Amino acid sequence: MKRKAIVLLILLLGISSVPAFSSSKPENPKKQTAWNLYVDSKEAYALKQKLGDQMLFIDVRDPIEIMFTGFTDVVDINIPFKIANRAVWNDKKPVFKMELNPNFEQEVAAALEARGLTKEVPVVIMCRSGGTRGAPATKYLENKGYKQVYVVTDGFEGGKLKEGERKNWRLKNGWKNSGLPWSYKLNKDKMYFPSEG
């Protein structure tokens, strides 16, 4: 009985060491995940400062997008969830077609293993705005053994302004607009390079 109490206490202390967050569940069901773990960019930064190498922070944007919009060296690795296929055009949007990275989950698992981590540790996923790739990437990891996967709800660039001179510019919240560290200089060691074959 005493041993069970000690184990329970250790578990409770471990859980309490993860900071509490205020980001609420997104209204749009497409942006919701089974874990219901949501952080904004400032909370993601605080979590990384608290847990350091005991978590994995992933930027899931296409590396070409990162090259033109900026990067934070606070993330551990860039593993794109979707990659632009420069051979296929999407007439609806008009842009290159974004295709699922077929190795996404395996690359996340490999990144954890390379750091000596398991699927038990927090994994934080950040895309451009929080919903278009962040939530779907998180959902993609469901039922694959991961225990706590967070979505950065405001993403790297944040949301679009709805009115004013800069209407539709991504200047509302987000990592880039929150005074957090970022640059146009990329860290080659953290960037995604597709594997051969």
Image (spheres, rainbow, N blue to C red):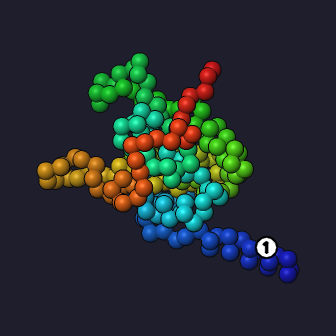
Q: Is residue 150 above or below residue 107?
A: below
Instruction: Residue at 32%, 28% (x, y): give it.
Output: 95
Q: Residue at x 49, y 49 (%)?
A: 73
Near mark 1 (Cα within 10 A), the count class, few <14, some 14-19 or many ≥20, is few
Position of residue 52 measured from the top left corner of the image (x, y, whole percent): 60, 60
Residue 66 picture location, percent across and down: 41, 39
- Observer-nearest residue: 107 or 2? 107
Instruction: Say whether residue 61 is left or right of residue 193.
Output: left
164 with respect to 24 (left or right): left
Quarter holding the C terminus? top right
Figure quadrant of residue 196: top right
Between 49 and 119, the one nearer to me in the picture: 49
Which residue sits at x=85%, y=81%?
Answer: 2
Q: Is residue 106 left or right of residue 39?
A: right
Up-down relation of residue 126 to residue 38 (above or below): above
Expressed as whole percent of the image width and height from the top left, the position of residue 127 reads 44, 46
Query: Could you say which is closer to the camera, residue 32 or residue 155?
Result: 155
Say whether residue 25 is visible.
no
> Is 75 located above or below residue 80 in the figure?
below
Amino acid at circle 1: Val
Q: Which residue is mark 1?
A: 7
